[in-house]
Each structure stands twice: as structure tokens, then as C-alpha cells.
Image (tube, grey):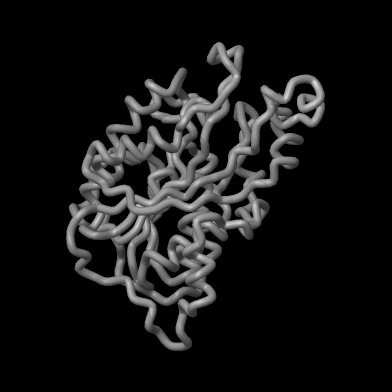
């Protein structure tokens, strides 16, 4: 495993390394659940590293790199278990793409997983406030003045998606919700089963300002903790191993440890890795000792 730095504790392992290298060093059928937000192709640039999948000129270049990861995710996932990725449709611009419109990034990701053998299991639409998006992006299609000028160029806001893929096979360790106090009552299940989540707090993220560097070209955008909590609760058991190949500042690991799971994460950018280690240590402090995930 080509690792620059690593922090291995009783219930988590964090690697400062390329995620493909990290996964290649992991055993087959060893992960119970994975949840992450992949780099959004060329929309955001996270670092200058040539190994950074977000540091690419176009979608073809991104998927040329991403397709090295997908088979490794398939290999390390246990049969019958699930992987969830957060994504959105990506806006195109006249300057970069020659036309103003949308790219079906969600569909491209799904097909990349299906090519390897993953089953398209489910997806949920996560509502986002179009007014907030308009104020942040100044997108032509969301501006009210465009309605008056020519509404043929007006469009709806772009939601987030949580897409879930399943590795074929019989799940050897069923995920059950029969614990004390009924940890998945009917009302909660109906909320989780809704195809649209209207109640995700977009501001419910780990504090991330200290992870930014002066040369960051775009802001980092950690996944909302509420989305992670629902995925982890619904599709993993306490004590399960949760994987994030794009750890960022450690949001998926923070929630996983908070909910009594173990965590493995990889992050290429040094400042994000350092912040992730701090966040993981904060939530892991005082947690019950568990067997070491991986020996050095």
C-alpha cells in the first residue's frame, strides 16, 4: 500500500494516500457499507495533484481515473451489501462547454458502477433551496430577471442525490433493526423510504474552514451529516466497517464512529487529512475499545 501517512486506532484507520492504492491493500469482502461524495468531475478542484480525480480537464478524464476505483470497491465489499454515493447533475457553461445546460453526472456514475457488476439498488432526491443556490452560483436559469427576459432559459434548481448500489450475492450478515426500543419505528421507516428527503439541513456539516489552503481553487463541500446518518443507520449494523475512499475532513467517519461503527478512510489532500484525523479523534475519544482494524 503506497501510503504517505496513516493513523490507525482501535476503531478507525485513516490514510493520507490515493484511494485506489489504499483499497488495493485491503482484503476481499471486508467492508460492510460505503458512503461518500466523489469529486464532482471538473466542477471543483481540490488539489494540484495529478492523482486528484477532481483535478481533471473534462468528464472523460475524470471517468478514466474513476474507473480504476470502482472495481476495487466491488472487490472489498461483502456480497449483498451496499455502497451509497452523493452526487448531483452538473451545470455546463458556455465558456467551458460551449452551451448552457446540464450534464447527467448522476447517470454516468451509475453506469460506471453497473459496468463492473454493481446492481442499481435505490436512490433518493435531496431537496435544496433554489434561492440559496441562485444567491451562491448566480446561475442564469435561476435568476428571476431571466423569467422576464426569456423564460425559455429558466430552469429548476439542482437537487442532490444519494444513489445506492448493491454487490450481488447473499448477505452473510443481515442488517437487522430489532434492537431494544425499536430503533426503526414505522414513522422513521416511512421517512427514510420517501423518494424525496425534504428535511435535510444543508448547513449540518462538520466545520471545515481550518482545512482550507490559500491555493484552494474552490470551496470544499462536506456531505451533510443527516444524509450520512440515514445511510449508516439503514444499511449497516453496529460494529460494521464503513468505508469512504474520499474522506475529506472525515464526515462519514465522524458519523460512523458516533453511531458505533468502525471506519476506514483515504484522503489525498494533506490539509483535509489532518483535519479529518482531528475530527475522528474527537468523536473516538472515550469510545469503547475494539479490535484493531488493520496492523501496520
Q: Residue at x 72, y 25 (%)?
A: 151
| Looking at the image, residue 128 lies above or below residue 145 | below
| Looking at the image, residue 24 lies above or below residue 172 | above
Residue 34 visible (yes or no) = yes
- Number of marks: 0
Q: Which residue is drawn at 48% across and 71% down?
A: 189
Q: Is residue 130 left or right of residue 25?
A: right
Q: Where is residue 55 in the image (x, y as percent from the top left)?
A: 47, 25
Residues 170 and 277: in front is 170
Q: Position of residue 52 (x, y in %)?
A: 43, 30
Residues 55 and 120: in front is 120
The quadrant in which the N terminus is found is top left
| Looking at the image, residue 112 lies above or below residue 57 | below
Q: In this view, does 211 lie to the left or right of 20?
A: right
- Quadrant of res 11: bottom left
Q: Residue at x 57, y 15 (%)?
A: 99
Amino acid at each position: 500500500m503506497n501510503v504517505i501517512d496513516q493513523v490507525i486506532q482501535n476503531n478507525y484507520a485513516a490514510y493520507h494516500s490515493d484511494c485506489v492504492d489504499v483499497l488495493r491493500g485491503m482484503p476481499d469482502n471486508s467492508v460492510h457499507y460505503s458512503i461518500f461524495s466523489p469529486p464532482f468531475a471538473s466542477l471543483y478542484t481540490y488539489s494540484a495533484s495529478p492523482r486528484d480525480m477532481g483535478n481533471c480537464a473534462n468528464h472523460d478524464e475524470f471517468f478514466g481515473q474513476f474507473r480504476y476505483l470502482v472495481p476495487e470497491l466491488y472487490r472489498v465489499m461483502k456480497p449483498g451489501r451496499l455502497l451509497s454515493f452523493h452526487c448531483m447533475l452538473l451545470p455546463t457553461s458556455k465558456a467551458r462547454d460551449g452551451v448552457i445546460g446540464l450534464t447527467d453526472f448522476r447517470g454516468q456514475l451509475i453506469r460506471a458502477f453497473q459496468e463492473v457488476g454493481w446492481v442499481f439498488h435505490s436512490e433518493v432526491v435531496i431537496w435544496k433551496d433554489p434561492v440559496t443556490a441562485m444567491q451562491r452560483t448566480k446561475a442564469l436559469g435561476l435568476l428571476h430577471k431571466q423569467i422576464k427576459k426569456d423564460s425559455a432559459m429558466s430552469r429548476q434548481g439542482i437537487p442532490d442525490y444519494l444513489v445506492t448500489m448493491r454487490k450481488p450475492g447473499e448477505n452473510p450478515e443481515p442488517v437487522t433493526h430489532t434492537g431494544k426500543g425499536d430503533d426503526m419505528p414505522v414513522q422513521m421507516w416511512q421517512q427514510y423510504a420517501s423518494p424525496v428527503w425534504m428535511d435535510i439541513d444543508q448547513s449540518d456539516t462538520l466545520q471545515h474552514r481550518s482545512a482550507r489552503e490559500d491555493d484552494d481553487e474552490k470551496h470544499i463541500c462536506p456531505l451533510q451529516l443527516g444524509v450520512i446518518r440515514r445511510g449508516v443507520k439503514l444499511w449497516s449494523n453496529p460494529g460494521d466497517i464503513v468505508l469512504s475512499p474520499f474522506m475529506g475532513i472525515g464526515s462519514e467517519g465522524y458519523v460512523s464512529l458516533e453511531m458505533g461503527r468502525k471506519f476506514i478512510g483515504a484522503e489525498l489532500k494533506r490539509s483535509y487529512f489532518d483535519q479529518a484525523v482531528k475530527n475522528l479523534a474527537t468523536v473516538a475519544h472515550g469510545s469503547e475499545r475494539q479490535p484493531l482494524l488493520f496492523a501496520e
